[in-house]
Image (tube, rainbow, N blue to C red):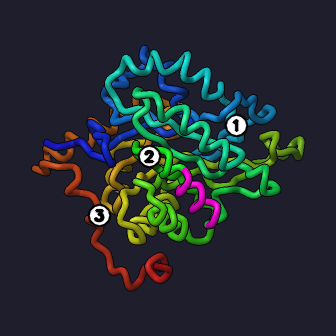
Amino acid sequence: MKESFTLRNVTFKNRVLVASGTFGYGDEVPDLVDIDKLGGIVTKSLSLKPRDGNPHPRITETPSGMLNSIGLANIGVHKFISDKLPILQQHHTVIIANIAASSIEEYCTVLELLEQRNAVHGFEINVSCPNVKEGGLSFGTDVTLVAQITKELRRRTQKPLIMKLTPNVTHISEFARVCESEGADAVSVINTLIGMSVNIKTRKPKIATTTGGLSGPAIKPIALAKVYETCNAVKIPVIGIGGICSWEDAMEFFIVGASMVQIGTANFVNPSTGVTVAEGIRQFCEQQGIDDVGKIVGTLQTNKTISIVDSWL
């Protein structure tokens, strides 16, 4: 039974990855999970210089999910290359480096540094960071900037280039289209939704930055709709993210059109969720006589004339 999926010049052994920011750099969990059974690892976001991130508290639980405002805290790309990559390259799974930056120049510099490393198989670009040079705008909510970033990075790598899109826009399909037109190999959908939680006794926000990113099972219905919208707008592969905790959840994303999925918040509950999901998908396909997971992708049976999403496309 075929589980693998090829993106540009890289083949993933299966279609289940672990999402950036939920699995560290991938070197902290070998005692908890066999990472070689994953399709791939998307690293914690990497910037040019180390970042301390936002002040504490920066994580809080919510009904069926969590809010985080980590602030892209990371060790920086140079320390990642010297300390983390030597460990990661001992494993037999695809390593996708997630890149975050405060300027287009920084995105380019970080990618160029990682492009030289054979142990890095591809890139996922987080375009939801503050654009310091543009007065604090978010890259991810500006179609023109997303297009420009994609174009500049595509010129600098022959490895898979994946753009991770924010759902905090009216039509995510518009952003997916410009990524496709500027040469992206795939888009990841979705990043976290803006959310908030308040302590009613202190009347203060539960995280220091007041608002943060909402993830977990609570956002799955929204993520599915955004993935469906995106898959109907572009021809490049879409990687589905948002509230996936089981193989059944992953199957929903495949059916609406996702070519691969990423496991995020569920990793905090059980780091082996990704492996369990991949095994569940394989067992289901074998039981149903399906010889290729890809045959499930985009098989949704629906009357599109009643879908609000289809009216946008």
Amino acid at the residue labelled 1 = Ile
* Residue 205 placement (x, y as % from top left): 82, 45
* Residue 154 placement (x, y as % from top left): 48, 51
Amino acid at the residue labelled 3 = Gly
Q: Quadrant of the N terminus?
A: top left
Horizontal side of 211 relative to 25 (left or right) equals right
Element at badge 1? loop
- Pick whichever, 2 or 132, lies toward us: 132
State the residue at coordinates (28%, 46%).
6
State the residue at coordinates (29%, 67%).
300
Element at badge 2? loop
Q: Inspect this view and state whether residue 295 appears.
A: yes
Cα separation between marks 2 and 1: 21 Å
Position of residue 179 relative to residue 278, above or below, is: below
Label located before the other in sequence (2 or 3): 2
Does the residue at mark 2 contact the one at mark 3 (Cβ under 8 Å)?
A: no
Amino acid at the residue labelled 2 = Ile
Q: Is residue 146 magenta?
A: yes
The furthest residue to the bottom: 305
Give the number of the disc on residue 70: 1
The furthest residue to the left: 289
The quarter of the picture where residue 75 lies is top right
Give the number of the disc on residue 298: 3
Q: Inspect this view and state whether residue 273 appears.
A: no
Position of residue 4 relative to residue 232, above or below, is: above
The number of numbered discs placed on residues in the rendered structure image is 3
Q: Which residue is mark 2?
A: 244
Magenta region, main secondary structure: helix
Cα separation between marks 2 and 3: 18 Å
